[in-house]
Amino acid sequence: MEAGLELADQANKPAYLECSKEENVSFYERYGFEVTGMCNPVEGCPPEWLMWRPAQRS
């Protein structure tokens, strides 16, 4: 996670992910991600939390 986010930051690019377990949301929040929405991609499947992290300047 850290290595990938470091590369994104060096390129001044944001990061996006979809999390399918609510209990993992706080893990990603520790890396600067914020929930931007929620969706149910297919009926009967668990919901997904859509998360975004802007590029970080060091």
Image (cartoon, grey):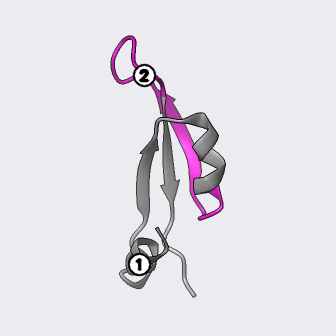
Query: Disc 1 vs disc 2: Cβ atoms closer than 8 Å?
Result: no
Residue 35 at x, y percent in the picture: 58, 44
Q: Secondary structure at mark 1?
A: loop
Q: Quadrant of residue 44?
A: top left
Residue 24 at x, y percent in the picture: 59, 45
- Judge whether residue 2 is colored magenta: no
Residue 11 at x, y percent in the picture: 36, 81
Q: Is residue 34 above or below residue 19?
A: below
Give the extent of the magenta segment: 29-47
Tell me the residue that label 1 is attached to.
12
Mark identifier at residue 46: none
Q: Residues within 10 Å of mark 1 (few under 14, many from 20)?
A: few
Residue at the (41%, 78%) spot, across then down = 12
Q: Is residue 15 above or below residue 43?
A: below
Q: Amino acid at mark 2?
A: Asn
Tell me the residue that label 2 is attached to.
40
Residue 15 at x, y percent in the picture: 42, 62
Which residue is situated farthest in the bottom direction here? 58
